Amino acid sequence: MIRLKIGGVPEHFNLPWKLAMEEGKFRDENIHLHWEDMSGGTGQMIRGLENKTLDVAVLLTEGITKSILQGLDAKILQIYVTSPLHWGIHVPFKSDIHTLEQLEGKTFAISREGSGSHLMSYVLADQNGWDIDELKFNIIGDIYGGLWALENNEAQAFLWEKYTTKPYTEQDKCRYIDEVVTPWPCFAIAVRTEVIEKYGNDLNKICEIVNSRARALKINPDASEVIAWRYGLKMQDVQKWLKETDWNYNGIDFIDDFSKTVEYLLKLRLITKEETNDFESKLFVK
């Protein structure tokens, strides 16, 4: 039996992994997966791949693309969630900020450098015509740090997946004013290169299993109830989220979308032209 350690955010996107593990679907293929919740998000998982405390990670497309092109010794197995991510833009509950224009020049709370909350702040700035060189950040670790930063005016904005933060907006911990949507499929599965070289066939089987379990969840009439119960969300919010969300049921490639991601990262000056050279061979297993 092979043993692999996998990390992902403790959010509803990763329920197919949890269900497949609970149902013994990986174990039936002689694969033992140890799941580690990564509340610090993509930045935390990139560190885990770097220091080899993780073998596999389910993380944001833009974050893993940037890190691999800048030298992370890992490869992308496949896109995991094919739909874009809806990032909620949150401000302090009692602040007088009500429009995106008021956020120009303000400080953004981010979980880590290279995280989605970090990179999507650049996307938001670009879409609104702000000077990206003027962006200011406060590294806060995770969602709870972000809420604390807003409450204590250590930051005036915080980007996080809007359904995950919905319970906190309802508790007046923060206020949602708008959203920014990723211009690409949101989650990818990445693996350290040496792990792929050793367990390539097993990793392909892992992807097949989780894609199949995601398909079963998507068509399950009780899916909304299951997700709402497990993640403390309201049924109507989960129903909306399920309509917006698709996993990579057939394991197809999304090379064109990675081209778009690379082009956008280059436009935002988050990677260099040299780093984009032959990006497909850097990102994927040949």
Image: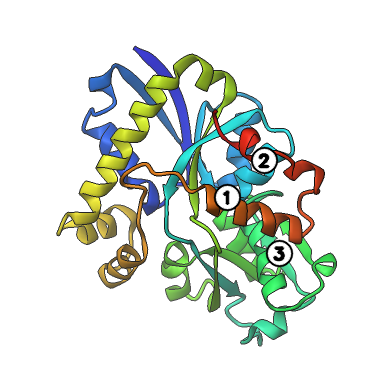
Q: Residue at x 84, y 69 (%)?
A: 134
Q: Mark 3 vs mark 2: give the one in front.
A: 2
Question: Which mark is first along the chain, 1 or 2?
Answer: 1
| Label drawn at residue 120 | none
Q: Position of residue 14 (x, y in %)?
A: 38, 46
Q: Mark 1 to mark 3: distance in Å? A: 18 Å
Q: Residue furthest left?
A: 221
| Residue 122: image tag | 3
How far separated are the C-alphas under marks 2 and 1?
9 Å
Looking at the rendered image, the quarter that the N terminus falls into is top left
Q: How many marks?
A: 3
- Residue 103: x %, y % from top left: 71, 79
44 left or right of 232 in image: right
Report which residue position mark 2 lands on.
279
Compared across the picture, whether 35 is left or right of 178 comes to left
The amino acid at mark 1 is: Phe
Callouts 2 and 1 close, C-beta under 8 Å: yes
Q: Secondary structure at mark 2?
A: helix
Rendered residue at 33%/59% (across/down): 232
- The Cα atoms of the two marked residues, 3 and 2, are separated by 21 Å
Q: SS of the residue at dot 3?
A: helix
Task: Judge left or right: residue 38 versus residue 33.
Answer: right
Q: Residue at x 61, y 61 (%)?
A: 146
Label 3 Cα crowd, 10 Å radius (few <14 / some 14-19 / many 20+): many
